Structure formats: structure tokens, C-alpha cells
Image (cartoon, rainbow, N blue to C red):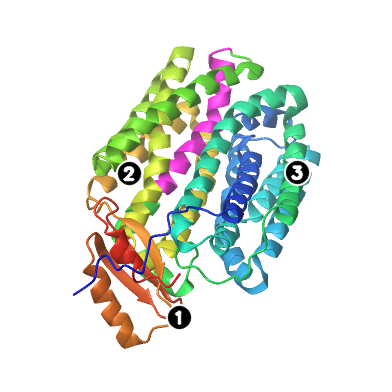
Amino acid sequence: MIDKNPPHKKINQDGMTRTERKAVFSLASIYALRMMGLFMILPVFALYAEDLEGMTPMLVGIAIGIYGLTQALLQIPFGMLSDRIGRKKVITFGLLIFAVGSVVAALSDTMGGVILGRALQGAGAIAAAVMALTADLTREENRLSAMAVIGMSIGVAFMVSLVAGPILSQWIGVQGIFWLTAVLALGAVAVLTFIVPNPVRSSFHRDTQTAPQQLKTVIKDKQLLRLDFGVLVLHMMLTATFVVLPLALRDEVGLVAESHWYVYLPVMVVSMALMVPFVILAEKKRHLKEVFTAAIMTLAVAEVVFMLMHDTLAGIVFSLFLFFVAFNILEATLPSLIAKMASPDRKGTAMGVYSSSQFIGAFFGGVLGGWLHGAFGMEAVFGMCAILAVVWFFFASTMQSPRYLSSHMIKVGEVDEQRARRLVTELTGITGVAEAVIVIEDQIAYLKVDLNALDRDALQYYSVS
């Protein structure tokens, strides 16, 4: 029988240490600065590209989305390389590639040059290495909070980028934005060098990194595939929409480029605020599938309204509002669904495939959006996005209802196979523990737990930390 309240063990409720907080927030700032560099041109590039030699609508779309292709191809290999030569070396290298890409784009007056620059920006694929370094610098019990901080920084960076892009393009031009992103990348190198702590030891972390031997199993998981397809479609829609939206605001509505931020700012602020109660309804009230599928259908409605009313300011504002309420809900709930549906010891691999799907979606969205715009007009772009959302809705409606469980880890120390099997039985006997997997070489138990029911004292008894 398990002693659920051992007198000699107490839960560590101190939260993050000062060093952990320093590491998490500095790494979040590095991630956010890079994402701002990628996204600030999203609301302005279609207008700027008209003055570039060799411009065609399809090349505009490729230039906007090409970063996703190189990012998707390189992020997992870069993460694996960081295991071999060190996290900071890989992140520094990636940031320098990003800076070079920004300079190439800034100096180019042809579409080919800008596409090359954007491809190099994406090739600075530091996401996996940043997550691995975050895991090196935080304890297992604080890992989830650390990743949440980085996730929020990405959301804030995206919102700021949509507003800052039009403002900065008025002051320094799109070439100036590329120069600024190069400076930001070098600033991120300085933050990494002088502020981010050096890890005492770097090791492989199954909760944040991709294990190559698990890829086949994860890719064959039909529930995870639904979610990977979903994030691919979501970022296809985002990129394709912004291939033509700035043109609709300027040419159809008559709003000068310098004033586009007047549209983006209130829409982003209000949509972010309205996202919160829906996420609470999804997670706390346990209506995740219902909120998730409703958000997908809202995306379809938004794109139909774009298609029918892109020549009026009211139509665009209403469509953008619907789009970003749904987009923000889905950006928050998709990773949560991945974590709930993936086996606890495969979460890192599942997230790696998910992230790659996201970036591939951005690439295909740019290519297809640009091609459709050139061949059939902007209505065809919005129509394609609406169809994609409807297809996604049918895939999502057939997914299993998620278990409302969270990932958790405890360090169990050195155990043999026999002891590991006993530990699995004992851990799953604790109230609130639904699933346990012990990886002997990691000396860690990977758990799925119901945080509302979890007997934390009993669980802490098995932790050697």
C-alpha cells in the first residue's frame, strides 16, 4: 500500500529560482525578437514588392512564405546538432544566418534577392535549440511554466509585428525593417552571450526535443496527424490571407499603407481579450473539442466574409476580427491538444512534428496564395482559405475527445527494469495519475496527470530531486 503522506518528503513550492527566471525570460526575448523579424513584413510586403524587379503575385507569395520551408527542414536537425556541439553555438549560428538573410533582403532590389534573404532568415532555425536550452536550464517541475512563457512571448511578438510593420514601413521603409531585424538578431546574440546562463550540463529532453526513433510512431498516430494537418492549414490560411489583404486595404478600400495599423491594432487587442474566456471554457470547463471545432468554422466564416466584402472597410474589419479571435483560440489550444494526446514520453517528438507542419503550412500558404492571386484574383485566395477551413473542420470533428490531462515529470534516479515496472504500477496507483512511462536512461518518469485531482504529496515521495 502506498503511503500518500510520507512525513519525510515535502513538495517544493518555491517555483522558479532566480537563475531559472533569468534563463526563461531572456530566451523568450530571443525567440520573440526573431519572430518579430519574420513577421513584421507580413502586413506590408505585398505593397513593397510592387517596386521590385521581376515581381509577380506568385513570387510575392513565395517571398512571404519561403522562410517556412527552410525553417521546417532545418529546425529538427539544428536541435539534434545542439546535442552534439552545444546549444549556444547552434543558436548563435542560427541568429547570424538570420542576420545575414535580413541584410541580403535589405540590399536586394529584385524578387530573387528578397526570396533568397527570406530563405536564409528561415534557415536560422533556432526554435528546437532554444527549447532544448530552456530545458537544460530549468528543473522538470518548472518546465511546463517555462514553455508557457516562451509561447506567450511568441503570441505577443506576432501581435506587435502586425501593428509595428505598417508604422515602421512609414518611417524607415521595408528595407529599413530588414536592416532592423538584422540588428535585432545581433542584439539577440548579445543577450544569449551575456545574459542567458550557461547550463551546468546539457542532455536530451524527451519533453521538448525530437527523438528520431520516435518519428515513425508519431507520424502514424491518426489523432496527432489531425492536429498536424490543422496547424498546417491554419498557417496556410494566415500566410495566404496576408498575401492579398494589404492590397485589399489599399486598392479596394482606399486606406493608405501608413494607416493600416489603425485596423490591425484594435482588432488584435480586442481579439486577444475575447480569446481568454473561450480558452477558459475549453480548458477549465472542459469543452475543448467544442470550442476548437467552433473556432475552425469561425475561420471559414471569416474567409467567406473576406471573399464577399473585401471591398469595404467594415467588411475587412469584421472579417479580421472573426479571423483573429478564432486564430488566437486555435494557436492556444492546438499545442494543448498535442500535449494531451501524445504519449508522455513522446511529447517532444510530437511537438517537433507539429512545429514543422506549422512552418510547411506557411510556405504552402504563400505559394498557393500568390499563384491564385495572379491567376484568378484575391477572391480566389479567400475562397481557397474558406474551403481549407471546412475540410479541416470535418477532420477535427472526427477526432477523439481529449483527456483533460497535463504532462508532468519526476526524476526517479537510477532504476533497473524490474524496479521501473514496479514504479509504473505504484505511480499509476496515485490519485490523479492516469499514465506513467519510465525511461531508464533518462532516470525520469513521464506522466499524464489530472491536476485537479492529483495527490501531489504522494507523487513527490517518488522524486529524488
Q: Which tag is nearer the camera, tag 2 or tag 1?
A: 1
Mark linked to residue 392 = 2
From which residue to which does the magenta span run?
230-254
Give the labeled residue for mark 3. Answer: 182
**Can residue 253 be found in the magenta stretch?**
yes
Give the mark, 1 or 3, whose residue is nearer the N terminus: 3
Give the mark, 2 or 1, whose residue is nearer the N terminus: 2
Classify residue 322 by image quadrant: top left
Question: Is residue 462 at all visible to an observer of this figure?
Answer: yes
Badge 2 amino acid? Trp
Name the spot of residue 111 as percent of width and height, x first: 71, 40
Q: Are marks 1 and 3 in contact (CB under 8 Å)?
A: no
Dominant secondary structure (helix, strand or loop) of the stretch shown in magenta: helix
Name the spot of residue 308 as percent of width and height, x first: 39, 20
422 over 49 or under it: above or below: below
User: Considering the numbered disc 1 on the image, is that residue within a helix, a strand or a loop?
Assistant: loop
Q: Nearer the viewer, residue 81 or 378?
A: 81
Name the spot of residue 243 as percent of width and height, x first: 55, 33
